[in-house]
Image (cartoon, rainbow, N blue to C red):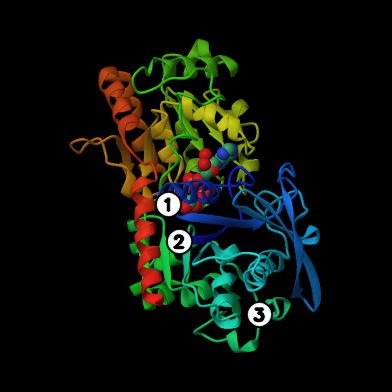
Amino acid sequence: MQVLFLASEIFPYAKTGGLADVAYSLPRALENLGVKVLRAMPLYQKVPWEGLVPLEKTLQVRLNGRPYTFRLFRKDNHFFFEQPELYDRPYIYGPPGGSYPDNDLRFGGFCWAVAEALGAGLLSADLIHANDWQTALYPVLHREIYRFPQPVLFTIHNLAFQGMFEKESLVRLELPWSLYHMEALEFWGKINLMKGAIVFSDAVTTVSRTYAQEILTYEYAYGLEGVLFKHRHKLHGILNGIDYQLWNPETDPHIYQNYSLRDPSGKEANKQAMLEELGVAAFFAEKPLFCFINRLSHQKGVEVLLSALPDLGRVNAFFIFLGEGEYGPQFYGLERRYPNMFAQIVFDEAWSRKVYAAADYILVPSVFEPCGITQLIAMRYGTLVVARRTGGLADTLVDVSYPGGYGFLFPDPTREDLLCGVKRAAELYNTHPRHFQKLRQRVMRLDFSWERSAKAYLRLYRSLLKGKR
Ligand SMILES: Nc1ncnc2c1ncn2[C@@H]1O[C@H](COP(=O)(O)OP(=O)(O)O[C@H]2O[C@H](CO)[C@@H](O)[C@H](O)[C@H]2O)[C@@H](O)[C@H]1O
C-alpha cells in the first residue's frame, strides 16, 4: 500500500507545533507496519537544500488569474513543492501570532500543485491522507475537480483553525462557483476549507476519542458542529503518539545529563543544572520546578495562566515558561515582576528539551486540546502533568486520586482550578517525596509510542481501500 501524506509542516524540515511531530512520527510508524508513505509539503525558506534532488518536470497552477510555476524536489520519501513567491519567506504561516494575507493562495495553491502532480504521474498513491486546514482544499479538488478514484482521509488536528476566507478567495483559488453552497465550501457568506474537507473526504479522523466527541458540540466545534454531526458516520478518534526514539532522555544530546527509567537520578542533575544556569539554584534547588511549553494562545489557557501569575508568584516553587504567540509580549520582563519565574518567548527545540528534562511538573491548562503532544513528551522525560481535563489530556492522563493514577487534572480552565492543581502538585512534592519519585517512574513506564495508533490508522486505510473496490 502506498499512501501520500500531506502536511504544511513536517519535522525536522518545518515545525511550529504538534502537527509537525505527528507528520514526522506517524508516517514512520506506518512504514514499520509495511506501508510506503510519500510525504509532501511546501519548500519554505528554512528547509535546508542539502540532499534535495529536483524532478525534471515542472507544474503550472493557475491562481488569482495567472500561472504559478511549481518545481518539485525529492529527498528520500519527502517531496517538497517549490514556489518562491509563495513560500520563500521568513515564517511558515506569518509572524508570531499573525498570518500572511495570501495564505489562501499559499496553501490552496499547494493543494492544486499536489493534485496536478498526481495527475501528471509525478506522484502516485493508493490513498491520500491530508491534514488540517492548510491541506483541506485537497479532498475537495480530488473529489470534485480531478475526480481521482483513490480514497481520501482527512485528519483534524485543530478545529480552531479552519481556513476561512472571504468568498472572493473562491475566485483567487480558481474554484467554480458551483462549490459555493451550503453542502460544499460556503460558510456564513465566506468559504471554509476545512468544511470542504469534512464534506468531501471518505473518512475524517481527529487525534483523540474525547475530542472526536467534543467537536460534535457547540462549545468545541467553532461553528462546524452541524457539518460534523451530519458526517459523524465517517468520524473517528485515533490518539496521537510520540516517537520514542526522537524523544528519549537516555540519548537526547541537548539535555544536561542523560537518564532513564532504570537510572532516573540524572533527572535531578538536569534540574539543578538548569536552576544554576538561571542563577536561582540557591533559592529553589529544594522546591518543585514547574514549566509550560506551548503556543502562547487562547487554546493553551494562557489567559488563565496570566490571571494566575500573582498567585503563582506566591507559591514556593519555580516556574519556567517557554512559548511564542499572540500573548508573548505579556511575558516580557516576567523575571523582574516575579523572582520565582523565568520566561523565554521563542520557539527553541533544544531549549524545550532541556526544560522537559529539568522540570518536575508541566502545566497544560488548555481551554481545548485535540490531543496534546507536550504532556506525552513530558511524561517520557519523567515530568508529571498538571492539566485541564479535556480532549486528549483526558484520554492520556489519570488523576492521582484514582488507583494507578499519575497526573493532576482539574475540571475547568479557570484561575482557581489551575491554582488548585498547582498546589496539589507542590504539596505532593514537598510532603511525600517517595511517592513523588514513584509517580515519576510510573509515567516513564507508560507507553504512548505510535505502535497501537498506527495500527488503527492502517485498519482505517484498509477499510477505505476495500470500500473503493
Ligand atoms: N516555544 C517552543 N519551543 C520549542 N518547542 C515548542 C514550543 N512551543 C511548543 N513546542 C512544541 O510544539 C509541540 C506542541 O504540540 P501540541 O500537540 O501539544 O500542540 P499544538 O497545538 O501545536 O498541536 C495541535 O496538533 C497536535 C497534533 O495532532 C495535537 O496534539 C494538539 O492537541 C493540537 O492543538 C510540542 O512538540 C512542543 O514541544
Residue at left 36%, top 41%? 448
Crowd class of label 1 (few under 14; some 14 to 19; many from 20; radius 10 Å): few
Three-letter amino acid code of the residue under disc 2: Met
User: Which numbered mark, 2 or 3, is in the foreground of this view?
Assistant: 2
Residue at left 60%, top 46%? 15
- Sequence-first tag of 1 and 3: 1
Residue at the spot of label 3: 167
User: Where does the N terminus fall, quadrant-wise?
Assistant: bottom left
Res. 419 visible in picture: yes
Q: Are marks 2 and 1 in contact (CB under 8 Å)?
A: yes
State whether residue 322 is above or below residue 191. Answer: above
The tag on residue 149 is none
Counting from the top left corner in percent of width and height, residue 281 is at 52, 13
Q: Are marks 1 and 3 in contact (CB under 8 Å)?
A: no
Residue at the spot of label 2: 1
Lateral position of residue 85 relative to residue 358, left or right: right
- Sequence-first tag of 2 and 3: 2
State whether residue 390 is above or below residue 400. Answer: below
Res. 299 visible in picture: no
Counting from the top left corner in percent of width and height, residue 272 is at 49, 15
Crowd class of label 3 (few under 14; some 14 to 19; many from 20; radius 10 Å): some
Is disc 2's CB within 8 Å of ligand 1?
no
Counting from the top left corner in percent of width and height, residue 124 is at 58, 66
Q: Are marks 2 and 3 in contact (CB under 8 Å)?
A: no
User: Where does the C terminus fall, quadrant-wise?
Assistant: bottom left
Q: CA distance from mark 2 to mark 1?
A: 8 Å
Three-letter amino acid code of the residue under disc 3: Lys
Residue at the spot of label 1: 34
State whether residue 430 is above or below residue 151. Answer: above
In the figure, residue 211 lies in which quadrant?
A: bottom left
